[in-house]
Amino acid sequence: MTPDQIAAAGQSLWQAEHDRAQRPILSVEYPEASLHDAYAVQRAYVDRKLATGRKIIGWKIGLTSRAMQQQLNITTPDSGVLLDDMAFASGATIPAGRFIAPRIEAEIAFVMKAPLSGDVTRDQVLAATDYVTPALEILDARIRRAEAGRIRTVIDTIADNAANAGIVTGAQRHSPDIDLRWVGAIVKRDGVVEETGLGAGVLDDPVTGIIWLARRMHHYGQAIEPGQIILSGSFIRAMECPPGCQIDADFGAFGHLTCSFA
């Protein structure tokens, strides 16, 4: 993709979010687009939001499960940017019309106290982490899922900021030294259990996702900064969140989160 095409694609994603109307599939419009192009479009989209006064508060890691990687025919996760207007406290009501087609996932969030970049080790990730906490990620798509017999690809997902739209967190704080593979959640929608899962579903260990992100960011001249929140990846399937629904995520001793969609 040319610089002008990248800028136009980023602007179109911002417009889709602003209008609450999905745009056509990007990978159909630009069949030659590479993963590098997709991240460049993501950056153009995020830059457009930063120009309105938004601030970066962290990063998300997606496509961490083998099932999702096989579905999209890839062997690596992806990443996106968390911005300050995406943050909600547990118990929040998400305003009607805020998102196009919201879905939700259960995750473990890492809150950092030291920078990370490059070929870091597991011990370095743990040493740089202030605490871990339960989180819900709100997903939304600014790109249509399917049209004219074609479906979104990983190019579309990455360009669309890894489908990121929001994050719900609470007050619980835990040492990152615990075995996060066994941290799990029971997630209900309107009182019905819809999904359950364990942290091991995230690359066998959520810490592995942070290692991957530090290496990917170094490749693009970026770094994880102190104070940032890192969503390590979902260990449940994305749940649709229609208007009026109530979400309850019980992480057991790790914590408890709720939110509702007006």
Image (cartoon, grey):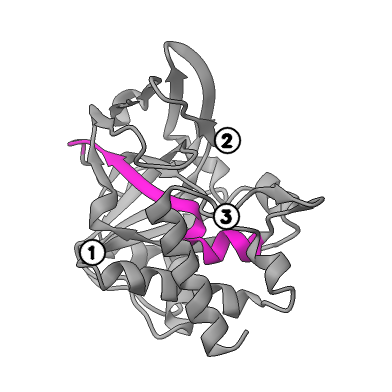
Please name the residue that numbered disc 2 is placed on.
Answer: 237
How far apart are labels 3 and 1 at the CA level? 22 Å
Q: State which mark lies toward you, 3 or 2.
A: 3
User: Percent x, y for residue 31?
Assistant: 74, 73
Number of numbered callouts drawn: 3
Please name the residue that numbered disc 1 is placed on.
Answer: 54
Q: Residues within 10 Å of mark 3 (few under 14, many from 20)?
A: many
Corner quadrant of residue 113: bottom left
Q: State which mark lies toward you, 1 or 2.
A: 1
Please name the residue that numbered disc 3 is placed on.
Answer: 143
Q: 19 or 114: which is nearer to us?
A: 19
User: Percent x, y for residue 228?
Assistant: 25, 61
Q: Which residues are magenta?
A: 154-172
Q: 33 or 196: which is nearer to us?
A: 33
Corner quadrant of residue 214: bottom left
How far apart are labels 1 and 2 at the CA level? 29 Å
Mark 1 or mark 2: whose residue is earlier in sequence: 1
